[in-house]
Amino acid sequence: MLSINEICLARDDSGKYRECKIIAVNKRSARVVIDGLKMTLPFCSLQKKKKPVKHPRFAKQADNKLLTKRLGRHRKISVVPTYFSVGRILGDFGQMIRSPSYKDDGLFLFNDNHMQWNFAINQPMTHQDSGGGNACIRPYESKGHAIGIPTGPYTSLQEVWDFDMGDGGYTKKSAKQIIDIAFDRIVTHCIYNPDKTTLFYSADFTHSDPESIGLGIFANRVGSDVVAYITHKLKELPEVFRRVRVSGDMHRDLVPLQVLPEDPLLVIHSPSL
C-alpha cells in the first residue's frame, strides 16, 4: 500500500520506471510529482521502491555473535546426593570407586580437613592416604577421580585460617573464601576433564534439607552456616559450570587436578595460588 510522501517508481510510456513522490492517494490511483510535474497515475503504473541492500562487508554485525570462546564441548553436569547405609553400594564411596559405572564419569566430592585440602591445592598429583568416612576416597584425588571440599572443621564462615600459598608463604583467609576456592577448583577440574559429568557427595538424610551435606566424623564441629553455604554451593554447581563453560570466564590462577591420562594434551600448568 502506497502512502503520502513516499518515494516510489512510476512507469512511463516506454515501460521504464522513474522516481516520483506520492502527494495524494485515491481509491484506484495516486497523485504524484515527477520532475516538478503533478499527475495522476493508476496503481498499476506505480511500484514501491526496494530498500537498498548493503554489501556484507558493511552490514551490521549480528548481536548474538559470541565474543568469547566456549570451553570444551557442550555438556551438562549433575550433582547427586548419596546416603551411606551398610551393605549399600550407592553412598559408599569405597565401593562405588570400584565400579566402572560410577568411576568412569563420576567425580567424588568428599569432606576434607583444612590441612590436607590445602596440601592438595599445591600438590594435586601427590598421593595422600585415606581418611575416615567419605574421605576414604582421598587416594583417588591424585588420579583425578575425587576432589575434597574443606569443612575445616570451620566453626563459622567468618573464621580465619592460615592458607599455604605453596611458595613458602602463608596468608589469612576466611572459611567462606576457602570454600569458594574449593568450588572454583571443582569447576576447573570438570572443564578440563569432560568425562566427569556426575558429581557425587555425601548428604545427611536426617537433616531438614535432605540434600544438606553430611558431616560424619565432623558432626557438631562445623558451623551451621558453613553447612548451609556448602550445600548451597553444591546445588548451584551445574549452573555455575554452564556459565563458566559458555563465557570462558574461569579463574585461570587455580591449579586444576591432574587431567586424566585418556586426554594428556589437556594438562594445564598454572601457577599456584
Image: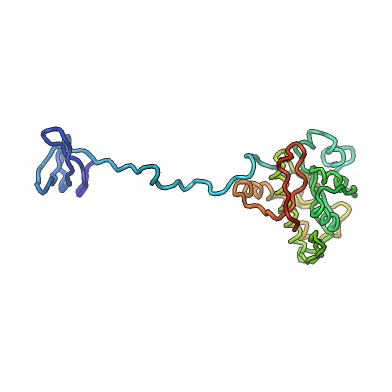
Residue at 84 percent of width and 43 percent of height: 140
Rendering coords of residue 22 (x, y %): 17, 46
Rendering coords of residue 144 (x, y %): 79, 43
Which quarter of the picture shows residue 218?
bottom right
Rendering coords of residue 190 (x, y %): 71, 45
Q: Is residue 228 left or right of residue 112?
A: left
Q: What colouring does the structure picture have?
A: rainbow
Q: Is residue 170 visible?
A: yes
Q: Is residue 117 left or right of residue 53?
A: right
Q: Is residue 95 left or right of residue 247?
A: right
Q: Is residue 229 visible?
A: no
Q: Toward the viewer: 134 or 161? A: 161
The quarter of the image holding the C terminus is bottom right
Q: How many marks?
A: 0
Residue at 20 percent of width and 49 percent of height: 5
The quarter of the image holding the N terminus is top left
Rendering coords of residue 86 (x, y %): 89, 40
Q: Toward the viewer: 119 or 117? A: 119
Which quarter of the picture shows residue 17?
top left
Q: Tell me if residue 183 comes above or below residue 41 in the rendering.
A: below
Q: Tell me if residue 206 comes above or below residue 73 in the rendering.
A: below
Q: Toward the viewer: 177 or 78? A: 177
